[in-house]
Amino acid sequence: MFKQIVKFLTSYKLFKLEVIQMVERIGKTVRKIGEIAGSYMIFLPKEFVRQHGLKKGDQVEIYYDDVLHVVPITKERMEKAAKRAKKLLEEVERILEEEW
């Protein structure tokens, strides 16, 4: 039983260390929510903006559930999405040709 407890505590410490390292790697900050003309807003951290090469007027996608995810819309992401869409359309056309 003692070995199991030691093993659990060791794995818990490793897990905690991994979480701390992940938070340090991904970044963390606290922001206040503001309001302008009935809309809510938060400001993005400068480091995030610099890392992603964003500037005023650029667009981001926002996904949310229990967590808010901000994803920069970059030229590369748009090109990858266009390639995926093209492949999907080609696959649909191929399937339709085979079925009909």
Image: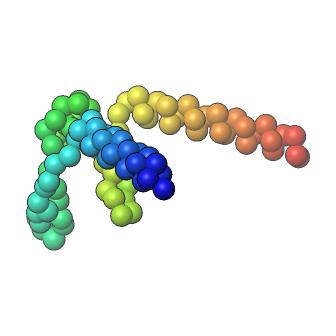
Task: Work out whether 59 lies above or below 90.
Answer: below
Residue at 16 percent of width and 71 percent of height: 38
- What residue occupies the far bottom of the structure in this picture? 38
Residue at horizontal 35 percent and vertical 33 percent from the top: 74
Front residue of 66/20: it is 20
Frontmost residue, 13 versus 57: 13
Residue 44 position within the rendered picture, expressed as x and y whole percent measured from the top left: 17, 46
Q: Position of residue 1 (x, y in %)?
A: 48, 56
Where is residue 32? Give x, y as percent. Answer: 11, 60
4 left or right, relative to 54: right
Q: Is residue 4 left or right of residue 22?
A: right
Can residue 53 be seen here? The reply is yes
Q: Residue drawn at (80%, 42%), measured in percent from left and top?
A: 95
- Picture quadrant of residue 83: top right
**Coloration of the structure image:** rainbow
Task: Decide which of 28, 61 is in the foreground and name it.
Answer: 28
